[in-house]
Image (cartoon, grey):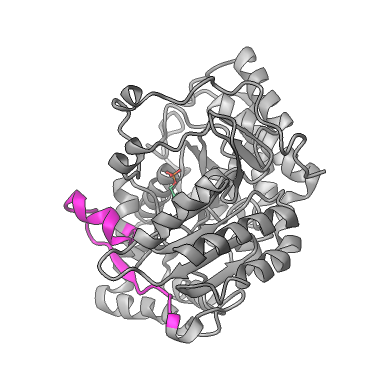
Amino acid sequence: MHKDPHPAVAPSTAPAAGTPASRLDAYWMPFTASREFKSKPRLLAKAEGMHYWTPEGRQVLDAVAGLWCVNAGHARTKIVRAIADQAAEMDFAPPFNMAHPKAFELAEKLVELAPAGLDKVFFTNSGSEAVDTALKMAIAYHRARGEGQRTRLIGRERGYHGVNFGGISVGGIAGNRKSFGTMVGGVDHLRHTHDLKKNAFSRGLPEHGAELADDLERIVTLHDASTIAAVIVEPVAGSTGVLLPPKGYLERLRTICDKHGILLIFDEVITGFGRLGAPFAASHFKVTPDLMTVAKGITNGAVPMGAVFAKRAIHDVFMTGPEHMVEFPHGYTYSAHPLACAAALGTLETYADEGLLTRGAKMAPVFEHALHSLRESPNVIDIRNIGLVGGIELESIPGSPGKRAFDIFRACFERGVLIRTTGDIIALSPPLIVEESHIDQAISTIADVLKSA
Ligand SMILES: Cc1ncc(COP(=O)(O)O)c(C=O)c1O
């Protein structure tokens, strides 16, 4: 059922040739080492199931679900059809004071899937927009109920919450912040939970570090709870290099937020839609946030879309004032875009048909076993995993942080496996249709490359 229909076949529609160097100039690429890329481009021209193909027809195993988003594998029929049909039927409908039926249908289906209590869905076009929407919701919620002084937002060191100003302000990846001047005011950060000395080579959640949640009490003491609107964390931090919450950490954070009337936001842009072996990290950890951001897997990466789930009580606070007035002055031209809604409906159907939102739990032991077989490989200093997410941390080359992992990324691509690296950490997040043979191929390729790195 999850097998590629044509796993080893080169694409019939592959472009005849690669892109000539002269054509590479105009595109200013996102989060890319551009000069390196343009000196030796890595192009992808077709995708199906677990694989990409380069323009020359070389097959590449996708060990990262594109960019943590293609959870059902590539070019899935129901999603492709849904998008095509929708484009033919209605391309666009204005989302302000107007709507189209699929937006409501999708919101209803998403709410059914979400942890109990997250009853309302607001649509955006990306994870970054979902994060900034959630932060604005939190501040506006407190104001609407008469606590307008609660404007402070608390993030966590090493957190990644996208690239908009709210997201980089609460984000904790130094390299993503330092170029952009003054951030949103009043933000503070919890300590991160990564502790190599105590937790290296943990399988699943690390034993040590639940008490790091108490850092929120320190921040509350410093600023006073009455100034704090919300805390935002990734339940499992992905982009910073797969950092897992220590056992009990998220529960403790929830308790402290409740004690002080602070909203808890889970950023589930990566963990949402089956990555951990449950529909959401909130369902997996049985900790329900007040607001939850998602994107990526919501449409299987096929059309840009993000969303914020909110508790009914938060939504309802806004529902006052004259009925002809906008209650929450926020939204995007493309909120609930018809193509995105159609893609998301096709995606949810595909997930349901194939049990993909829980398949990660079944495959997790196989993945864990394979991943930890790299423990004795050269320069590996930690391996961590949960569901179908894995992180392999490498000793940095002195004076050249990130170089070792980047070279491994390039070498793996040349050998037909797409991985992702951040700093000197390799991150793996295969599509949830992954089979044992794909895992073996990815891990043995990495093992070979590590030997010569
Ligand atoms: C946790 C988290 N939040 C937000 C984002 C930003 O999403 P986007 O790139 O769709 O804006 C990402 C992207 O990787 C993410 O991992």
Which span is picked out in magenta?
A: 170-196
Q: What residue appears at the point 55 percent right and 77 percent down from the top-left corner?
A: 376
Q: Quadrant of the C terminus?
A: bottom left
Q: Look at the image and tell me whether residue 196 can be seen.
A: yes
Q: Is residue 188 magenta?
A: yes
Q: How many numbered discs, if any? A: 0
Q: Nearer the viewer, residue 363 or 115?
A: 363
Query: Which one is in front, 260 or 196?
Result: 196
Q: Quadrant of the N terminus?
A: top right
Counting from the top left corner in percent of width and height, residue 48 is at 66, 35
In reply to whether residue 28 is colored magenta, the answer given is: no
Q: Residue furthest top?
A: 88
Task: Work out whether residue 290 can be spotted.
Answer: no
Give coordinates of residue 119: x percent, y percent. 61, 49
6 sits to left or right of 298: right
Say left or right for 409 vs 416.
left
Q: Position of residue 201 (x, y in %)?
A: 55, 78
Above or below 364: residue 14: above
* Left or right side of 46 for 326: left
Relative vertical location of residue 374 with respect to residue 39 in this rendering, above or below: below
- Spot the residue most to the front: 452
* Residue 388 location (% of width, % of height): 64, 59
From what the image shows, is residue 453 above or below residue 207? above
- Which is nearer the eye, 306 or 74? 74
Occupied quadrant, residue 139: bottom left
